[in-house]
Image: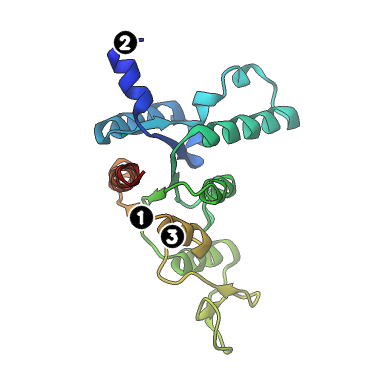
Amino acid sequence: MNANTAQTMLKPKVYLAGDLVFRPNAYAIFEELKAICREVGVVGMAPFDGQEGVEEMQPGIATSLMIATLDKKLMDVCDAGIFCLDPFRRAPDMDPGTAVELGYMCAQGKPLAGFTVDRRTYPQKVQTYRRDAWADTLTPRTIKGGSGSMEDADGLIVHSEGMVQNVMVEGFIQMSGGIVGIDASLHKAFRIAITALALELAKRSMQT
């Protein structure tokens, strides 16, 4: 083992999560994000890093469950997680699998961060989605209380005002000591978030 390898092993490992895994240029994106991680003193771990051999498997339930199992194992050995909160498949919400991963790592007590290129608030995203998909609009709620002042055409509360995603997502990030990086550039948004996450990890390291 050379000195560089030993030094890398000592650096905090950060799980890089998000719908990025589904994008056409996913591998290239993760390599670029890993380079930013190295700049701030952490080791970025993409889901693909724990999925050796999966590409040879046929699509189906067994393959999907294998990916979930391997991703869980990778999260277990990481010290923190950073999550892409971009809307998924033109809906207002983020990728649901990423949300599950965020909750899992939060339950482990690990520091979290998020990043997104879409600075609209969650209610604004819902409003646009309802307009484009269902040709309806949001209306003010007549009942006070709760987590939002508007409701959709089905009478459901449009919650999480002032946040870019569901309060359980952004709230868990904040409660872990993390932030959400926002910029029109994916790489800049990621850099904002990973820089803050690296500082949080360094602070925790000094406290132990």
Where is mark 3, residue-wise? 175
**Sequence-earlier tag: 3 or 2:** 2
| 154 relative position to 35: left or right | right
Amino acid identity at mark 1: Ile
Q: Which mark is residue 179?
A: 1
Marks 1 and 3 sit apart, C-alpha to C-alpha, by 9 Å
Give the label, 1 or 2, closer to the camera. 2
User: Which residue appears at 32% of the width and 53% of the height?
Assistant: 182
Please provide percent x and percent y for residue 61. 74, 32
Q: Tags 1 and 3 in contact by the CB under 8 Å rule?
A: no
Q: Is residue 148 above or below residue 57?
A: below
Q: At 29% from the left edge and 30% from the top edge, which residue is drawn?
A: 38
Callout in the foreground (1, 3): 3
Labelled disc at residue 79: none
Q: Which residue is mark 2?
A: 2
Quadrant of res 134: bottom right
Q: Nearer the viewer, residue 42 or 129?
A: 42
